[in-house]
Amino acid sequence: TGVQTCALPIYAEIEAFFHAAKFYEFFTSPEVGLFDTIPNAHGGDGNLPINLVTNYQMPAPASSQALLPTRSAMYFPRENLAMGMGMVYGLTGVSGDIIALGQGNHADFAYDGQTIYHEMGHLMNRALSNLKYTITLDSYGMNALENALEQGLAETMTFLVSDRSGMFRYIDRLEGPGFFRDADNDLSYPADYCGKDQADAMILAGAMWEVYGALQSEGVTTPQFTRLLLLSMQTLDANTAELSFADWADAFLADMEMEGRAAQKTAVAAIFEK
């Protein structure tokens, strides 16, 4: 096709499986102690498969000689696939949810572990909080704040599993610029809110990176922080109301007290209020 791709894309399946398994084991570990398997993102007791599609390229017009390079990764819940997205994206005949990892012009997204953690984070958000892509209307127009919350939690899970604040450097270097994000930032709400969910997500991710560091300095371990994160995600319920950053702060602070961390609440509340 004349398209330059990354070296050795035949290993994309191994990369995808390894990083998805690493994410899964991180959040179901005995040290975190909440669950042995990630809860079903669609309700019920049975577990559904998580399908990882690597070297993914978009369907092209019949007149095209090749599929279209895809400079992204995507999480598709089974409901969205059934509503027509499976047909549009060429992902039919599969049971369960799908994470599609694009084959771009110069990079294979399956080679970026943090990309896989981020997409798995979307699945976790749906499973624990029923967070999904949501646009609402308010007196100012379209409101994507709940999307920013959802994306920000996915970024928080990404920096936890990878243990670094900078994210998506590999993709940014080969397929960018524009993919790199850093949770170690000074963004605040509403000063830096722009209405674009992936940019606004870094407001929440930045706050959570600072909270993570503050609690670590007080002796809180990574599994203990992860437990707090997951409990707070379970406390949220996107079915009951439109959710905001303030709702997340309230849930996290409440679960800190439930987990015997009341002594650190004042410091964490101050970070959320900035």
Image (tube, rainbow, N blue to C red):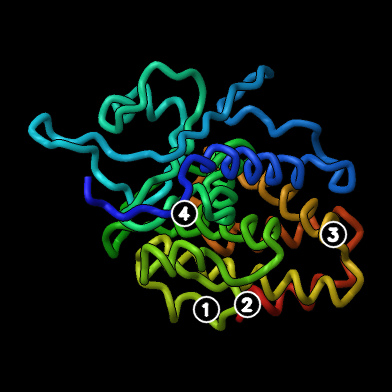
Q: Is residue 91 above or below residue 25?
A: above
| Residue at 55% from the left image edge and 66% from the top image edge | 167
| Chain-order first, disc 2 or disc 3 | 3
Q: Which residue is mark 1?
A: 188
Of badges 1 and 2, the one in the foreground is 1
29 on left or right of 15: right
Q: Nearer the viewer, mark 1 or mark 3?
A: 1
Q: Identify which amino acid the numbered label 1 is placed on.
A: Ser
Q: Which residue is mark 3?
A: 257
Residue at figure coordinates x 22%, y 50% from the top left: 2
Nearer-N-terminus badge (2/4): 4
Q: Residue furthest left?
A: 63
Q: Amino acid at mark 3?
A: Glu
Q: Position of residue 52 (x, y in %)?
A: 52, 34
Left or right? Give the position of 133 relative to 114: left
The residue at the point 91 percent across, 59 percent down is: 260
Query: Where residue 146 is drawn, which disc sits there?
Result: 4
Sequence-first disc among 1 and 3: 1
Look at 36% across and 27% down and name the residue there: 91
Count neighbours of disc 4 (C-alpha within 10 A) and say few if under 14, some if 14 to 19, many if 20 or more: many
* Distance (Cα) linking label 1 and label 3: 25 Å
Do the residues bearing badges 1 and 2 touch, measured as CB atoms within 8 Å?
no
